[in-house]
Image (cartoon, rainbow, N blue to C red):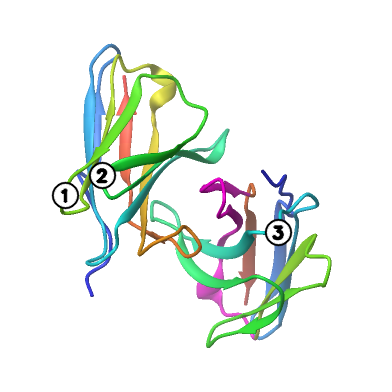
Amino acid sequence: LAKITQPISMDSYEGQEVNITCSHNNIATNDYITWYQQFPSQGPRFIIQGYKTKVTNEVASLFIPADRKSSTLSLPRVSLSDTAVYYCLVVNTNAGKSTFGDGTTLTVKP
Amino acid sequence: KAGVTQTPRYLIKTRGQQVTLSCSPISGHRSVSWYQQTPGQGLQFLFEYFSETQRNKGNFPGRFSGRQFSNSRSEMNVSTLELGDSALYLCASTDRGMETQYFGPGTRLLVL
């Protein structure tokens, strides 16, 4: 399974764009990359998922380079309510197992 | 559609007891996965069920077990509780594979 590393914490200000990078060096061919947001005492909330290149939805973008050994979650114009822990998850669809990163605590300041 | 629901939301037990947690997946989803979340170990995969069969299992002792019913609802059981079992237990459902998992709010278990 992929070994996943992501920064422990990041600070930002309201209105800025935030990029959080996740490293998954030994990602396998059938692995998908998913990002989740989690607030205290709540379950992780799905943000975005991708396999390669770029994916965009109404809340975020996900950039995955050709070698797929890393991925970057981009949050445009963050607000105070985006303060949360962000997890990178790699799902091995062959083994049917998931590996979470340790999470990045994003703090958005006014 | 209603989201993933978990019951109970909070639970207090003592060492040596056993506990059963319940998870109802999103309607139509047939795969349910369970995770343990602790401050020290983060989110760790416990097991995954699909159509009443356990397909995958993480690295947890045999005290942790689960099952899935024909309506896709799942239960997780922990026997002979230890202090270290105190955690937030999360379940997630998907419609087929595990590519996109939707999580419930979790059950907070405290073992005294």
Residue A67 on the magenta segment: no
Spot occupied by residue A17 in the image (x, y as percentages of width and height): 71, 82
Q: Residue at x 71, y 54 (%)?
A: A28
Assign a secondary structure to mark 1.
Answer: loop
Q: Which residue is mark 1?
A: B70
- The part of the chain drawn in magenta is A77-100
Ranked by sequence position, the earlier of labels 2 and 1 is 2
State if disc 1 and disc 2 touch (CB < 8 Å).
yes
Going by the numbered disc 2, the residue's amino acid type is Glu
Spot occupied by residue B5 in the image (x, y as percentages of width and height): 23, 56
Nearest the viewer among A51 and B5 is A51
- Along the horizontal axis of the image, is B89 left or right of B41? left
Question: Could you say which quadrant of the image residue B86 lies in?
Answer: top left
Nearest the viewer among B108 and A92 is A92
Q: Quadrant of the C terminus of chain B?
A: top left
Nearest the viewer among A65 and B42 is A65
Going by the numbered disc 3, the residue's amino acid type is Thr
Q: Residue at x 40, y 25 (%)?
A: B85
- Along the horizontal axis of the image, is B31 left or right of A109? left
Q: Which residue is mark 3?
A: A29
Q: Residue at x 26, y 17 (%)?
A: B14
Q: Chain of mark 1?
A: B
